[in-house]
Image: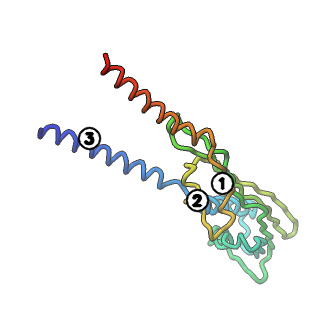
Amino acid sequence: MNQLVKFMLKRGSYLFLFSAMSLQVFGQTKTNLELFFQLADSAANNLQQNLHNEKDFKIDFVLGKDYQVFQNSILANFENKEINNESGKILIHFALAEVKVEYSEPERKGLFGSLWVTRNLRFSGNYSINSTTSVVKDFLYTVNDEIPFEDITSFENSSFPFTQGKIPAEPLFSSLLEPAIALGSAAAAVYIFFTARSK
């Protein structure tokens, strides 16, 4: 009896450890807003490379009401530069055109697995660098990954509409298949049980 308890406790600790690791892996999936900030950093790094060590400049943001949240994030990439909001030697216009998330149709992983969707984030716009010459650059950064269908809303932020995409409908066949298989399995088990007893 004691060995059985020890075995169960040992297996239980492994199960707990596995569950904790699974939760930790899931917890590392970034929200839509976090990914958009990451893409904004990529755009800022691209701009910084095209400045060729120039230090005195003014940035004029054309972000629109919905995207103002990215201004400080982009400016943070220029901490070591001398940003003069009044009169920099170089004038930069930084504009965002599209910040959008889309989800694919849900697909089931395995016969009884959960539904997953592909998440596609787009962050696009352009910037111009005006000094003795003018340079205009377009940029487009994307992220594609998979997230659980049932958790889509937990990756979105209702305070920022651009983090919300159109949530696809759950497939009708998929929602009917699981109960049908479960019912069929139960019926088969009952049939086999009574057939075996009658013999």
Q: Which residue is mark 3?
A: 11
User: Residue at the left extreme?
Assistant: 2
Circles 2, 1 touching at the beta carbon (< 8 Å): yes
Q: Which residue is mark 1?
A: 167
Q: Earlier in the sequence, mark 2 or mark 1?
A: 2
| Residue occupying the point 32% across, 48% down | 16
State the image coordinates of residue 194 (x, y, percent, origin top left): 35, 24
The amino acid type of the residue labelled 2 equals Thr
Is 113 on the left or on the right of 34, as rendered?
A: left
Residue 174 sits above or below residue 48 on the image: above
The amino acid type of the residue labelled 1 equals Ile
Q: Earlier in the sequence, mark 1 or mark 3?
A: 3
Near mark 2 (Cα within 10 A), the count class, few <14, some 14-19 or many ≥20, is some
Q: Which residue is mark 2?
A: 153
- The picture quadrant where one finds residue 45 is bottom right
Quadrant for the C terminus in the image: top left
User: Residue at the top extreme?
Assistant: 199
| Residue occupying the point 59% across, 61% down | 34
Q: Secondary structure at mark 2?
A: helix
| Residue occupying the point 72% across, 71% down | 66
Q: Secondary structure at mark 1?
A: loop
Query: Could you give the CA–CA distance between mark 2 and mark 1, rounded to whole angstroms?
Result: 9 Å
User: Of 76 and 173, which appears nearest the observer?
Assistant: 173
Count of labels in the image: 3
Near mark 3 (Cα within 10 A), the count class, few <14, some 14-19 or many ≥20, is few
User: Residue at the front extreme?
Assistant: 198
Q: Secondary structure at mark 3?
A: helix
The amino acid type of the residue labelled 3 equals Arg
User: Of 174 and 194, which appears nearest the observer?
Assistant: 194
Query: Could you give the CA–CA distance between mark 1 and mark 3, rounded to whole angstroms?
Result: 39 Å
State the image coordinates of residue 166 (x, y, percent, origin top left): 69, 56
Query: Could you give the CA–CA distance between mark 2 and mark 3, rounded to whole angstroms?
Result: 34 Å
